[in-house]
Each structure stands twice: as structure tokens, then as C-alpha cells.
Amino acid sequence: MTFHDRADAGRRLARALAHYSHENVVVLALPRGGVPVAAEVASALDAPLDLLLVRKIGYPRQPELAMGAVVDGSPPVIVRNDDIIEAAHVEEAEFIRVCRKELVEIERRRRRYLGGRESVAVAARTVIVIDDGLATGATMRAAVQALRKRNPKTIVVAVPVAPMDTIEALRLQADEIVCLEALAFFGAIGACYEDFRQVADDEVIAILARLMPQSSP
């Protein structure tokens, strides 16, 4: 399955999630790529949209390779890909250095995207967590672990595309997974899109201004 762009993927994902339209739903996007996908789902389900600020901890000599992931919080939630850390002979000090760098980026994004707006309440609600695709799944695993601490009723992971083994590993953490295309042989997420241009900060901000509930005065 090939998607034209993230909005197209989001519309298709929304159809697969239509059975949630009568539930008390919150849609959480992993920025930046997950935001245009999640926007289509939130609009279709008439649900509030919010962000789940999570960053991949990339191997310094191959940044696309995830050593783990970190999620905003007090304290932050860190997920480690120990097999990659061991295979790449990554020292603990190097892992911590990259992790701290990503926490700085998370803080930048919070200020830039959310300003003073409060997070949407998720306790006792069905939460649909969306990205534009998964590779190792490290960022999504971290996101789900952090989200559990906020006591949602149900966590649904929804993505357009992912490897089969990543989806199977996530089944141990999420209550439900909706994946439009689970692939046995997986290259890169971008290969499944005709248009996979980088999502700009301004696009994220514009989408949130349209769909994220405003804080009460």
C-alpha cells in the first residue's frame, strides 16, 4: 500500500478507526510527522488533538538507528533498545549524552508548539496514539509506557505502516493496534509515501491551533 501523503494516510486510518466515533476519545500525535496524520483522525472522530512529546535516541554514527527513546515527563520515561546498544558497543555515557540532547529538543518543542496550553486530560478515556509509521517502534513503546501513567481507559496505537515484528512486540503494551499495512520486509517509512517531505514547525502549530482545545482562562 502506498500513501500519497500524510493527510491521505490519516484519512484512510480514520476510516479504520471509525468504530471509536461514539467513545470518549482523545487523539495524541507523535510530532512532527504524526501530526498531519492524527489531524485527519481527530477531525473524522470529532475528538480533541494533543501531542505526546517523544524523541528517538539515535545512534550517533547512524542517527536513524534507535538506541532507544525518551518521553517528556517528571521524570522522563526512557526506553532502551539493549540489543542495538550492545551490538554497536555504545558506552553508557554516550547514551546519556544523546538522551539529554533529545530532552532539550523536547523542551524546545513544548514551548514552540504548546506555549502555555495544558495537556488534554486522558484519564478514563480512550486514547489513540498516532505516528506516520513505525520502524523499530522504540518511540512508540516509550510513548505507551509514559501514557499508562496518566491512567487512560484504553490505549490504541494507530499507524499507516510498520514492520510485522514491531507490531507484534507492541501488542504486549497497547490495548489495541490498528495498522493499515504490516510488512514482513520493511525498508523505510518514506518508501511507503509518494510525498514524505519533512513536516515544519509552523505546520504543526497551525494544526494544533485548529484542533487542540484552548485552555480555560
Image (cartoon, helix red, strand yellow):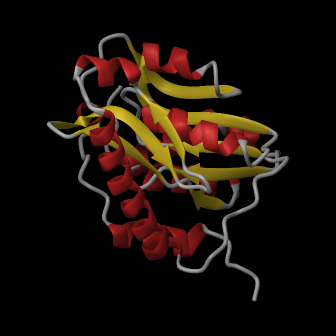
Q: Is residue 157 above or below residue 40?
A: above
Q: Is residue 82 left or right of residue 30?
A: left
Q: Is residue 100 above or below residue 209?
A: above
**What residue sits 24% from the left and 23% below the top?**
187
Tell which residue pokes out farthest to the bottom in this image.
217
Residue 14 at least partly seen: no
**What residue sits 47% from the left and 71% below the top?**
113
The percent position of residue 165, horizontal first and vertical second, equals 44, 13
Q: Is residue 151 above or below residue 161?
A: below
The percent position of residue 134, horizontal first and vertical second, equals 41, 32
Rendered-image quadrant of the C terminus: bottom right
Frontmost residue, 214 versus 93 = 93
Q: Is residue 48 left or right of residue 72?
A: right
Tell which residue pokes out farthest to the left in this image.
61
Frontmost residue, 11 versus 197 = 197
Q: Is residue 135 left or right of residue 130?
A: left
The percent position of residue 164, horizontal first and vertical second, equals 44, 14
**What residue sits 72% from the left and 44% below the top?**
149
Tell which residue pokes out farthest to the top in this image.
184
Residue 192, quarter of the rendered image? top left
